[in-house]
């Protein structure tokens, strides 16, 4: 009887060790994949070169460029952009714009560009004051997204890295910094 018990115990232990080894190997193979999907490794952008080449780019989910053009995915030069301090975001940005929300008849709050605060040469940013910037527009719901947004772009050509909502003279999305101080940091006086 003891011999039978030992055989069963050894068989069970072997089964347990095999289960743990298989689980460990599965974790080794899947965790890096999940980390890659969870990082800000790619962002969407549309370039004039892609348009001229007539390529059919991969469309970023629900995001279109000016005129509804799709934007292909590409590497993000600042993967930790959201974690940067305000001064570092300003320095890392090639374009910074102010957009004000304006209600539309279809229930959408259109983000209309009211001012281009920074636009480095060669950024390829083709939106002008008075244009709608669709990626920041939204359909009105119960949430309050403020009066408008400050939108940061990086790279050449420029693509959106971050946006922060503002109400009155306070940019809530940038740790409640006053708009006047933010404009001074950029070099514009409001």
Image: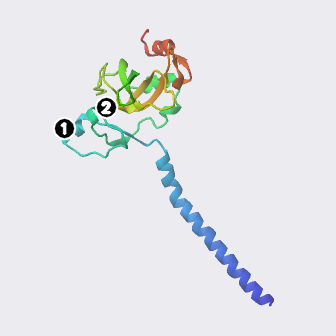
Q: Given the current orientation, which residue lies at the most extreme right position?
A: 2
Q: Is residue 129 left or right of residue 171?
A: left
Disc 1 designates what residue? 52
Residue appearing at x 45%, y 28% in the figure? 163
Q: Is residue 163 left or right of residue 83?
A: left
**Residue 43 image point, x, y percent:** 39, 39
Disc 2 designates what residue? 157
| Callout 1 crowding tier (Cα within 10 Å): few <14, some 14–19, many ≥20 | few
**Residue 101 image point, x, y percent:** 41, 23
In the picture, the quarter occupied by the N terminus is bottom right
**Residue 177 image point, x, y percent:** 54, 18
For residue 98, what is the image quadrant? top left
Query: What colouring style does the render use?
Result: rainbow
Residue appearing at x 77%, y 89% in the figure? 3
Q: Is residue 142 above or below residue 100?
A: below
**Residue 5 image point, x, y percent:** 77, 85
């Amino acid at each position: 009887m003891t011999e039978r018990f030992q055989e069963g115990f050894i068989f069970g232990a072997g089964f347990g060790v095999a289960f743990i080894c298989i689980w460990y190997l599965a974790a080794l193979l899947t965790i890096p994949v999940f980390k890659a999907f969870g990082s800000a490794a790619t962002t969407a952008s549309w370039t004039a070169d892609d348009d001229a080449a007539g390529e059919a780019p991969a469309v970023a989910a629900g995001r279109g460029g000016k005129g509804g053009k799709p934007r292909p995915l590409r590497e993000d030069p600042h993967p930790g952009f959201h974690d940067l301090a305000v001064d570092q975001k300003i320095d890392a940005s090639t374009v910074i714009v102010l957009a004000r929300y304006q209600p539309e008849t279809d229930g959408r709050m259109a983000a209309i560009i009211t001012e281009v605060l920074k636009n480095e040469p060669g950024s390829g940013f083709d939106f002008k004051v008075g244009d709608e910037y669709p990626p920041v527009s939204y359909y009105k719901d119960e949430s309050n997204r403020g009066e408008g947004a400050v939108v940061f772009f990086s790279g050449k050509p420029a693509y959106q890295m971050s946006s922060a909502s503002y109400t009155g003279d306070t940019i809530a999305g940038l740790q409640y910094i006053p708009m006047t101080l933010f404009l001074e940091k950029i070099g514009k006086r409001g």
